[in-house]
Amino acid sequence: MVLKITILVNTNLRLMKKNITYKILPQINIVVEYFSGPIHISDMIAHKKDIIKNIEFYPNINFIADLRDSQLLYTKQELSEYVGFIKEEKKLNTHRKTAILTSTPQQVAQSTIYESLTKDLPIRFKIFSTLQATLEWVSVKKGLEFSMIEGTILKLKNESSVRSHYSKVLQRQ
């Protein structure tokens, strides 16, 4: 008999399983990232390494990082190490925009620290609490492009929920 253990974190009165996923939308110059559950710096670094290996990735593509369902579990020192990784990675340290979508004071605080640590990088960061403001800042056109990104975030979120559900079902077997 094999025992599988999944670590769940209670965030906003829900049990959250760690999930980090993304979709590159080259036709509108955006990488949409979705994070849920407990997130560590090692997760962020592995995630970025995965993105830059993707054949659709190119250095000046803009990012939207949806952190609203995540719990950021890292220190300022670890965040500094992550910024060091970004500085060293030439494919990431380029002229582009990164919009960070948040929903909690803790996410805003962590993102603000991150923004302050990246002042000398060519990347422009901005923190948002609404998807509409996020999309406007990264120059997404209203209409079809807005709908495409909203749909992508919903799909990434739902895929995360489905994986979590099947993980729970498999654990019971």
Image (cartoon, rainbow, N blue to C red):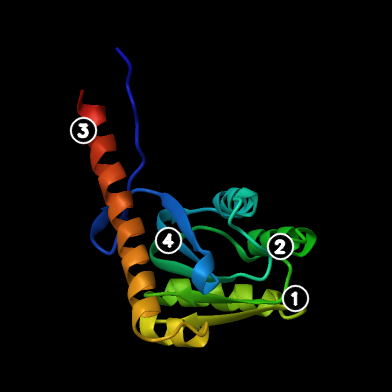
In the displayed structure, would residue 89 be above or below residue 140?
above
Q: Which mark is residue 34?
A: 4
Lower position in the chain sequence, tag 2 or tag 1: 2
For the residues labelled 3 and 2, the Cα–Cα distance comes to 38 Å
Lower position in the chain sequence, tag 2 or tag 4: 4
> Which residue is the site of mark 3?
169
At label 1, the amino acid type is Leu
| Count of marks placed on residues | 4
Lower position in the chain sequence, tag 1 or tag 4: 4
Horizontal relation, residue 34 to residue 61: left or right: left
Q: Nearer the viewer, residue 82 or 126?
A: 126
CB atoms of marks 1 and 4 within 8 Å: no
Characterize the local packing of mark 2: few (<14), some (14-19) or many (20 or more) Cα atoms within 10 angstroms: some
> Which residue is the site of mark 2?
86
Q: Which mark is residue 121?
A: 1
For the residues labelled 3 and 4, the Cα–Cα distance comes to 23 Å
Residue 65 point in image, percent of width and height? 49, 68
Q: Nearer the viewer, residue 144 or 83?
A: 144
Q: Residue at x 64, y 48 (%)?
A: 53
For the residues labelled 3 and 1, the Cα–Cα distance comes to 45 Å
At label 3, the amino acid type is Val
Lower position in the chain sequence, tag 3 or tag 1: 1
At label 2, the amino acid type is Ile
For the residues labelled 2 and 1, the Cα–Cα distance comes to 9 Å
CB atoms of marks 2 and 1 within 8 Å: yes
For the residues labelled 2 and 4, the Cα–Cα distance comes to 19 Å
On-image quarter of the N terminus = top left
Residue 130 visible in image:
no
